[in-house]
Amino acid sequence: MANVKNKKQQPGRIAITGELTIYTALELKDKLLTGLSTAEELELDLSEVGEIDAAGLQLLVMIKQEATAVGKSVRFTGHSPVVLDLLDLSGLAGFFGDPLLFVCKPTHEGKSA
Amino acid sequence: MIPDEYLQTFVIECRELLEQMEEALLIVEQAAEDPEIINAIFRAAHTIKGSAGMFGIDHVVVFTHAAESVLDRVRSGDLSMNSVLAALFIEAHDHLKELISHVAEGSHPADETDNHGKSLIAQLEAYLGEMGGTEAEQAPNLGEMPVVHQAKLEREESEAVETDLWHLSLRFGPEVFRNGMDPFSFVRCLSSLGSIVELVTIIDAIPSGEQMDPETCYLGFEISFSSEADKLAIDNIFNFVRSDCFIRILPPRSKASEYQRLIQELPEQEMRLGEILVKCGTLTPEELDSILRIQSQHGDDPQRPIGEVLVEQQMVSPPVVEAALEKQKQVKDNKKSEAQLIRVDAEKLDELINLVGELIIAGAGTNMIARRAGMADLMESTATLSRLVEEVRDSALALRMVQIGATFNRFQRVVRDVSKELGKDVDLVISGAETELDKTVVEKIGDPLTHLVRNSMDHGIESAELRIARGKPAKGTLKLNAYHDAGSIVLEVSDDGGGLNKEKILAKAIERGLVSEGANLSDKEIYNLIFEAGFSTADTVSNLSGRGVGMDVVRSNIQALRGTVDLDSVEGQGSTIRIRLPLTLAIIDGFMVGVGNASYVIPLDMVVECVELRAWASDEGDGQYLNLRGEVLPYRRLRDHFDMEGDMVQRENVVVVRYGEHKAGLVVDRLMGEFQTVIKPLGRLFKGEKSIGGFTILGSGEVALIVDVPGLMGQIEHEREVGEMAVGAAR
């Protein structure tokens, strides 16, 4: 099961363990959003994620975008092999590493036409 | 199938284009070649072909393509446009119009139509063949379009993107997760058939924070994929999600136009061009070169930065660049034109007019109360209010106003066809095309006008020999004119033909029993006899022949619009038919009268005069006729007619009304003055009642009936005839 540990009670750091899938997405969404609201900088430890699917990935994208939107930052650390595998497959590694590379920003629009 | 809304837009656009095309063709047929006009025809054909292609309406594409190819020859000067070719194109235009109407109805053209289309294509292709040029055979597909941007568009249709990769576009439906499926499992499955070269996960649809439902799927993929598998095998992978997903699979070396279509289909709007291309892209060095060329040609173009992005990313082929640019431009263009013109449902306009009507009624009510209360301030402010309401009314009515020009222009074609049919040379001269009138009226006036135009050409304008013999130019002239006159619009159809022969009309009318022998009729009265119902016969004498055919129908159509029609003619010089129509059908100026406790409204323009009944010492003619300054005036007490109860008043008044050539007197209790009336139609229950045309609501909230004067006169006439017959039978 997915669990969120506040390791050493450190604010701004959430470790996700076990499943990061459709089965845990609902509960994780709230936790991640709560975590983001209480900290300026959120670190997500993915080292103990045993399973991840598209719903989980979607969730990570959401929290990343949310953080960008409110001017905070989210870092993912210690990607477990399954996470790395999916990031590789989805081609989203770049998105998480450098949020400006792929994200469609309307500000670029004006110049393009 | 094509979604209805797009299809409708397509059909509307095509019809507009066809109209432009027809107009241009008629000009071309008449006059010498004007490159501008030929271009206009070509553009219309080209655009129709393009959009038909987008919707996959192949038979339209095939047909238009044939026409377009020939037009292109004309444009480039290889072929010269002459009246024969123009006539062929007019036929092609008609066929295309028919095809489009089949598309609109969702029906399939009959075999006959198909065959006609084929023979037209053959005729068109004969022109290409005549060229004998090797070009025509080598490249039937438009390699050599002279205009630059069109050349590019054409190339897209024929040129394949040089990639060995499949391209897959996937947008997963929201229920995918809940249905227990993981989009990535399909991707992994795909790997079993080949190798994924590039995969872009589309995350644009993921909503922000609170709005996001973690169990809803927002994802999509753009995948370029290298595989030896066939399309079916790849397609089969997605069997489980097919129902709620958007899936497009483009095989290697797909035509650029396929990519173009894909870009147009993708849900992401206004996305960055670069990103579209990244998603769609696979690349060869040559294609990259082309991009570089395009970019360097437009060196100082603002698009350059994106070009650079493309170069860096090395992801696209040129037609795809264009497709993406096209999509962006479309979005922009649409926005621009949306701002200038809005298509509005006619029903919404009707509703607005209706509301304005209510407003006028409510305003009248307030006015009345203000006057009764005698408060100066209130009266002043209601006066301002009514002025504003009147302005609102005028602008609301103006919304419905359209120019008569479009309707008139349609007659270019009618005149052309009829002249061919009759072997007469006739010129159509249009004036007053910018005159505006109510859309409903415009729609309904088309048929009567067509009839009049045909009639004038058939029977008015003489044959060329006769014209020369009479010292007129061999070419006949038909004029359509429109102008505003005192709150109504006047449409004139005039010809410079032989005019009407009074004696013959009169003789015919006497023969038909329409007038009694020895009747003293003015010229105008005689001419207008041709509008009588009994006059419509086929076997009439040459000079006035057929002029009466269906003229009574024309008149009744026009009368249904509350209009009138009359005719002027000078023998040997031509005749003019004048149609007078109200500007709008919704609101009229009325003259209000009281009978008993009820109020009635008589359309003001039919009221001639009001006379006190006592001016006549007593009824003459058995209570049926009055002597109006020596004129016999049939009259009717509205009290009797509508079976009203209530006390008789001391001083009854006679309202003399006139419709056409008929006059009648209506006896009423009170005259209440002019009153602006919003006509509301009566329910179906009252359909049989001829003497009431509608009703209106007064300021006080009471209902007043609107007297339909022609209907009432007809009824009186009918009753009199029945009465006479009864008297006759009794003898």
Image (cartoon, rainbow, N blue to C red):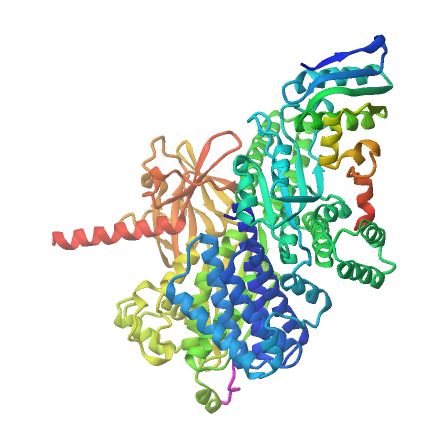
Answer with left or right where residue A87 lies relative to residue B556.
right
> Height in image: B147 above or below B83?
above
B473 falls in the magenta region? yes
Left or right: B658 in relation to B392: left
Which residue is drawn at the image coordinates 22% and 50% (left, top)?
A: B723
Name the residue nearer the viewer: B313 or A48. Answer: A48
B715 on left or right of B92: left
**Residue B408 on the magenta span:** no
Q: Position of residue B698 (x, y in %)?
A: 50, 34
Report the span colored magenta. Answer: B471-478
Nearer to the camera, A44 or B391: A44
Is residue B371 placed above or below B50 in the rendered structure? Answer: above
Quadrant of the rendered structure where residue B221 is? top right
Q: Which residue is depicted at the point 38% across and 76% down?
A: B502
On the image, the x and y values in percent for residue B193 come to: 60, 43
Residue farthest to the left, as pictured: B731
Residue furthest top as drawn = A9
Please give the name of the residue rendered at 30% of the width and 50% of the height, measured from the top-left corner. B624
> Looking at the image, which residue is at 70% across and 37% down?
B202
**Which quadrant holds the C terminus of chain B?**
bottom left
Q: Does residue B430 appear in the picture of this structure?
A: no
